[in-house]
Image: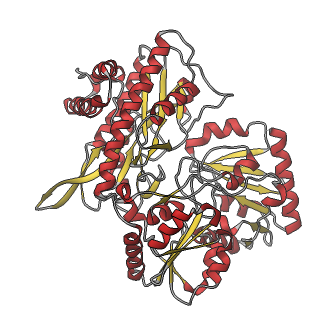
Amino acid sequence: MKQEISQRIAELRQQMQAAGVDAAIIPQTDPHQSEYIADHWQVRRWLSGFTGSAGTLVVTADKALLWTDSRYFIQAAQQLDGTEVEMMKDGIAGTPSIEDYLIQNLKPGMKVGVDGMLFSAQQAQAMRKAFEKHGLKFVTDFDVIDEIWPDRPTLPKDKVFVHAEEYAGESAKSKLARILADAKRQDAEAAFISPLDEIAWALNIRCKDVKYNPVTTSYLYVAPEGSTLLVDEDKITPEVAEYLKSQGVDVYPYAKVKEFIAQLPDKKVLIEEARTSTTLTEALGDRAVMGASAVAVPKGVKNETQIAGIRAAMERDGAALVRAFMAIEDALAKGEKITELDVDRLLVKYRSEMKNFFDESFGSIIGYGPHGAIVHYEPTVETDATLEPNGLLLVDSGAQYLDGTTDITRTVALGTPTQQEKHDFTLVMKGHIALGDAVFPVDTRGAQLDVLARQFLWKEGLAYLHGTGHGVGHFLNVHEGPQTIRLNNTPIPLMEGMITSNEPGLYRENIHGVRCENLVLTVKAMTTEFGEFLKFETLTLFPFDRELFETEIMSDDEIKWVNDYHAEVYRRVSPLLNDAERAWLEAKTAPINK
């Protein structure tokens, strides 16, 4: 594999030389600026061998470098070892940005090339400005991957299906009207939508084009005279075509998107420049109105039908997890071999038996011992560790159900926990509880709450570098915006109806990792003379490991939070279990005390 990476990079350099390109930038995305992408767009992975979901490859005549963030430092170091690709620790002091690196290492007049379909208008504009200021040329027509990737996977061919209104809670026709109303408020007459999850939400359609994310490869044009879904027509069944027609939506070939844009009437079209490729933005020209997404906030704020659905899905998910963790404990007690991949299979087995199950919501992170310190570690045949009756097991997993998306992390002790394991876990849980129990005014942003989750770690000189919370879709992407809970600011506040993760962690390299994650729903708290206040309702229903709590450093209120949460878990999940499973859950949710 290492030799193949070198050969692929060498072939890319030949194409660069032929095109007069001195540096090529290859992102991990697709023409829709997606985080999770179909195999057809896994260009950076194919070129570098690094499989993480975040990272950008830069290739020059004599260097190959990969920028990735703290979630992947350990993984990238392992996967790039033995190749010429060097890891650049993005976000760490002393690591230059891609632009700064190229400005420092290229000479004036040299050319930086990208595929403009893979860079948003916002990204391309910023890069062009930075490079041209220092005498470098920037071109967006460097697309040579088909020339060097002979067996490149084709675009997905899965069929589109309708996500019934009984789950979605609103018709596509109603959503399209809302999108047009928002476009009008932003001085546009129509809207062109690129993000795949926004299109899936707007039209109440789903597909299996992207692993774990039930979206279809497409674009959507929304206009008063009628809307158009640009999609491979072979993916549309007669039933779906009839459904789309009933919602005022025509179908046009996905591959002809540039042609479609060229023939649009001379009217103002709303686009989100951060999520629309620079190639298509340039094709729109003066017709493009740069504005905020007309979909992100309506999609992020769940309606009552969706909220009822996710509550029910969480109960079933909790029951599935009870069975999976019982099976793990049983295998260890019997001395049977059980590995990280076996845990993954157990999670899928029991979830797939549940009503409305569709798929996993992401690749499960199953990290035993030192593997738990690799934030986004996914076991492979080569790395699969055997569990022993000692140490910590970190399990971060989730499911896609027709009525909701789940995402949960639990860290459990497989034997008698050490003092350090208990202390680390309890510090993380104190932050989890502080955030989960927060009450805050309307218009509060996630960055204003993030410190609640980190404070107890910081007091002991400990930290984690990833975000504390991300938005979660409804039978859609497990990661969605517009809200976040993290150190860097996101301008969109936490709004009533939004679902967000609460997942502080702590990672000791080569020792263990701890992460504790629930999904929370933003709900009304109270109204006083000082205004309206919001709080979180915890949606996830599965116990934390009672054996890992160092109750001596917990307040009475924190202990009460754990006991109240566990009582709710038992109340909601136990009716779905048999007698043995209920007994197991009863023991796992018994009160903790100082």
Q: Residue at x 36, y 37 (%)?
A: 316
Q: Is residue 531 left or right of residue 299?
A: left
- Residue furthest out toward the bottom: 266
- The foreground one among 115 and 447 is 115
- The foreground one among 136 and 398 is 398
Is 551 situated above or below 568? above
Q: Residue 133 in the image: x percent, y percent?
A: 67, 74
- Tell me the colour scheme of the image: secondary structure
- The foreground one among 177 and 369 is 177
Q: Residue at x 64, y 74 (%)?
A: 257
Q: Is residue 439 left or right of residue 360?
A: left
The C terminus is located in which quarter?
A: top left
Is 238 situated above or below 460? below
Q: Residue 106 in the image: x percent, y percent?
A: 78, 63
Q: Residue 490 in the image: x percent, y percent?
A: 42, 60
Q: Is residue 116 left or right of residue 514?
A: right
Say how many tags the image has. Answer: 0
Q: Residue at x 31, y 51 (%)?
A: 307
The N terminus is located in which quarter?
A: top right
Q: Residue 518 in the image: x percent, y percent?
A: 36, 40
- Residue furthest out toward the left: 529
- Residue furthest out toward the top: 334
Q: Is residue 246 left or right of residue 276?
A: left
Is 396 situated above or below 416? below
Is residue 569 among the parts visible in the rendering?
Answer: yes
Is residue 129 among the parts visible in the rendering?
Answer: no
Q: Quadrant of residue 583?
A: top left
- Residue furthest out toward the front: 238
Q: Quadrant of residue 444?
A: bottom left
